Image (cartoon, grey):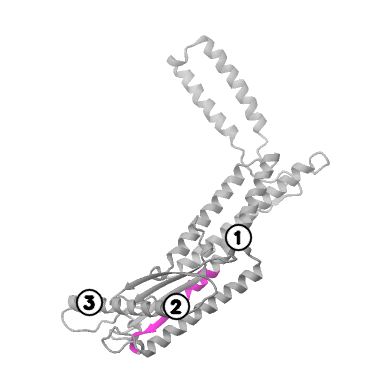
Amino acid sequence: MRILQTDSIFTSILLSFTRAMLNFNKNQAMKNSPLSLFFFIILIILTSCASKKTLRKPLFETTTYKGQKGEKEVTAINKNRAEREKDHFSALEQADSAKRLLEDEQDAMNEIDTTERVGDIEVALKKVYQRTQNIINELNEVSPYSINGHKKTLELAAELNDLMQNYIEPLKKMIEANKEVKKIGGDISFNVGSAVMNQNGEKEISKLVTSIQNDMESWDSYLKDHNVNIFKDSVYRLMIIVNGYADGQGNGNEENRKKKNLELSQIRAQAVADEILEQVNKSEYDQEIIIDIEINGRGESYPPNLNDKDIKRNSPERRISRISMVVGPQIILYEK
């Protein structure tokens, strides 16, 4: 977008209009004249229009933005202005790209069932998206041709680069981890009607806990490959959601049966969470880990992606605990 070259036109209009207003004030009292009020409103509108320098397309031939190329030839006289303009539109392109990536990441997050989304990741996405949008707004308000405007452009471009490297790209990795839901089958992990985890269940949990160390090593490799020093010595956050489910079997009327199955799903979800915490606390990690865990009993509600057509009342697929587990450097969560 090009800075409207109507700034000088607006300025001339404002000067002429102001002179007319001054002459008018000499002859009539402003307080009692409806016409003077009309002139005053027009003055405000013109001032507002003149103060907003909206970029529409590049001015110089060395700059292209959204397929639009400037037309003005670059000379020794305007070379600095052309370079500043190019930096400015480069920052806008970078901001637009960051915004599109964040929108793609939000779409990916929306594909995860609401009961299994890690809330801290969603909050971080919203914060980073808002900051990116604010940067775009600030860039659109900056005059790219002035020295101060160019300085501001470079500062915003540097912040955008930090957002991309330290938050936007790593958040994608966290979202991918959130998509991977682990299942603990009730039939093999608990005895019939019991909420006490058996040895088979403990072995399944052991596999999950082992995967935590693998994920942390994966993060170490990622950070080394991307040369991201901001995460050096960072505290890690382990975010877990445990959702327990029960089938539709049981004695008594429907209300009592559902109540008992809800309680059973809650107790089993708690048992799964307790076993995870116990095994994690026994493990040794190179980095400090903060653990956040959410526990939900869903009763006879169907687990995600299942419905009446797919399963029976006593289907084993309903007697499960579903675990969403994400580990990563806490700083990625953009807690600002």
User: Mark 3 = which residue?
Assistant: 258
Q: Can residue 69 be seen in this view?
A: no
Q: On the image, which quarter does residue 239 sit in?
A: bottom left
Q: Mark 1 or mark 3, which is nearer the start of the sequence?
A: 1
Task: Please tell me whether mark 1 sits on a helix, a strand or a loop.
Answer: helix
In which quarter of the view is residue 11 placed? top right
Q: Is mark 2 on a helix, strand or loop?
A: helix
Q: In which quarter of the image is the N terminus?
A: top right
Q: Write the start and end of the magenta stretch as one range.
A: 173-187
Does the image show residue 242?
Answer: yes
Mark 2 — residue? 280
Identify residue type, mark 1.
Answer: Met
Mark 3 crowd level (few <14, some 14–19, many ≥20, 10 Å Cα): many
Magenta span main SS: helix
Q: How far apart are marks 3 and 1 (CA)?
A: 48 Å
- The residue furthest right is 76
The mark closer to the camera, 3 or 1, is 1
- Farthest residue to the top: give it: 27
Task: Inspect the image, locate mark 2, and give the three-letter code of the amino acid beneath it.
Answer: Val
Q: In this view, does 297 lie above or below 78?
A: below
Outermost residue toward the left in this view: 252
Residue 283 screen position, x and y as percent: 47, 79
Question: Where does residue 262 sit, x and y in percent of width and height?
Answer: 26, 76
Say which quarter of the image contains residue 320. Answer: bottom left
- Using the image, tell me which numbered label, if any, was put on residue 164: 1
Q: Residue 238 location, x and y as percent?
A: 46, 71
Residue at x 54% of width, y 79% of height: 214
